[in-house]
């Protein structure tokens, strides 16, 4: 009798589990279908190619088409000199080799814009302009109102000779596979409100919100791409999630307002700084990763829209998330 009862309970559990899985899949499929219906017209201008192929006589036409790329304080002689500069010519050539066309990126951006527009209907699809900016990697992507500027010379691959003097943890992100993720991050930074609470926990959840937006905007992307990690770095983080969290708790970091914690665990860096032997094995920005997992846990347990999420205080998210790191 007891055996039959246990068998019946197992059967009920399996049926319920299948129901939850199937319901979840159907819900995701319905969202994907709605997103696919969103009409997005993407307009890409390869200014980098146009300028590279221009002659001095073409400058007037280029300035007319792209007035925002030619600051008035610079005379035409500046642009004429740039057209002839051997370093600039080499830069244009290398960008042309890495991006002979922009078709794959255009398709990915089109999908990204569909997803953004689904969750933020007021989003206006910008005109995309590719250019070079002398490897100013801090400003790889600029999203400003109706324009999206992408500096393609910042995506030539981490081993490119142009990047030999750049620290490796930075050059690792100078790869074309991160273009769309950088655009998503740029938009996310505009919709996640600035911090009021300056605790380490609030900082982590601030970044966690932006990474969660990438989950929604780039559902097919690997977590490594969203995080800007290599697969090895992500694997290390997954394997050490529990001791990372335990360290934050034991060291009483969560409600600390010590600005050094941001430098140690949130800002780009070659590794995170626990002050332990494992530091050199770790990737930087582990605090961002933990914040991401907290936000994910919160969203898994609460029926909250993405637009609502960005405005919810960090403390509320943390308490309702009941975050448990994987062992």
Image: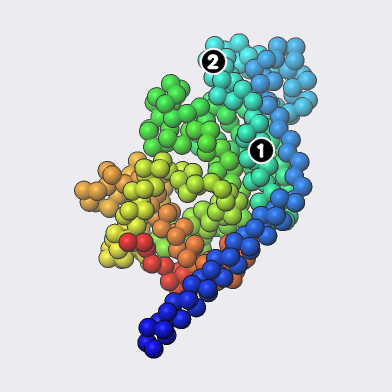
- Residue at 32%, 53% in the rendered image: 239
| In the image, residue 272 above or below residue 310 | above
Q: Nearer the viewer, residue 30 or 320?
A: 30
The percent position of residue 274, horizontal first and vertical second, equals: 27, 53
Inter-mark Cα distance, 1 to 2 = 28 Å
Q: Nearer the viewer, residue 47 or 282?
A: 282
- Residue at 45%, 24% in the rendered image: 160
N-terminal of the two: label 1 or label 2?
Answer: 2
Quarter holding residue 78: top right
Q: Are marks 1 and 2 in contact (CB under 8 Å)?
A: no
Task: List the single residue furthest toward the bottom.
Answer: 1
The percent position of residue 42, horizontal first and vertical second, equals: 73, 38
Which numbered marker is on residue 97?
none
Mark 2 burial class by Cα count in 10 Å: few <14, some 14-19, many 20+: few
- Residue at 54%, 15% in the rendered image: 90
The percent position of residue 248, horizontal first and vertical second, equals: 32, 61
Kind of element beneath mark 1: helix
Q: Please name the residue that numbered disc 2 is placed on.
A: 90
Which of the two discs, 1 and 2, sits closer to the camera? Answer: 1
**Does the image show residue 77?**
no
């Amino acid at each position: 009798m007891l055996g039959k009862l246990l068998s019946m309970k197992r059967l009920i559990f399996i049926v319920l589990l299948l129901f939850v899985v199937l319901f979840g899949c159907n819900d995701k499929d319905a969202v994907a279908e709605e997103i696919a219906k969103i009409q997005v017209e993407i307009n890409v201008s390869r200014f980098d190619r146009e300028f590279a192929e221009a002659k001095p006589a073409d400058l007037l036409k280029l300035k007319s088409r792209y007035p925002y790329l030619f600051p008035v304080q610079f005379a035409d002689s500046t642009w004429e000199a740039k057209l002839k500069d051997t370093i600039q010519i080499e830069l244009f050539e290398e960008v042309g080799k890495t991006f002979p066309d922009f078709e794959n990126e255009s398709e990915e951006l089109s999908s990204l814009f569909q997803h953004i527009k689904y969750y933020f209907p007021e989003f206006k699809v910008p005109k995309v302009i590719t250019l070079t900016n002398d490897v100013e990697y801090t400003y790889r992507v600029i999203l400003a109102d109706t324009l999206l500027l992408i500096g393609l010379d910042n995506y030539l691959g981490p081993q490119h000779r142009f990047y030999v003097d750049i620290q490796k943890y930075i050059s690792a992100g100078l790869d074309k596979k991160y273009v769309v993720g950088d655009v998503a991050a740029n938009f996310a930074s505009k919709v996640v409100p600035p911090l009021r609470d300056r605790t380490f926990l609030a900082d982590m959840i601030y970044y966690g919100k932006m990474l969660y937006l990438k989950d929604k905007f780039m559902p097919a992307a690997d977590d490594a791409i969203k995080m800007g990690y290599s697969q090895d770095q992500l694997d290390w983080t997954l394997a050490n999630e529990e001791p990372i969290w335990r360290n934050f708790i034991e060291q009483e970091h969560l409600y600390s307002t010590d600005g050094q914690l941001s430098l140690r665990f949130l800002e780009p860096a070659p590794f995170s700084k626990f002050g332990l032997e494992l530091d050199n094995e770790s990737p930087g920005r582990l605090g961002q990763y933990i914040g991401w997992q907290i936000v994910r846990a919160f969203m898994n347990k609460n029926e909250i829209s993405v637009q609502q999420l960005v405005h919810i205080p960090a403390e509320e998210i943390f308490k309702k998330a009941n975050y448990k790191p994987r062992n």
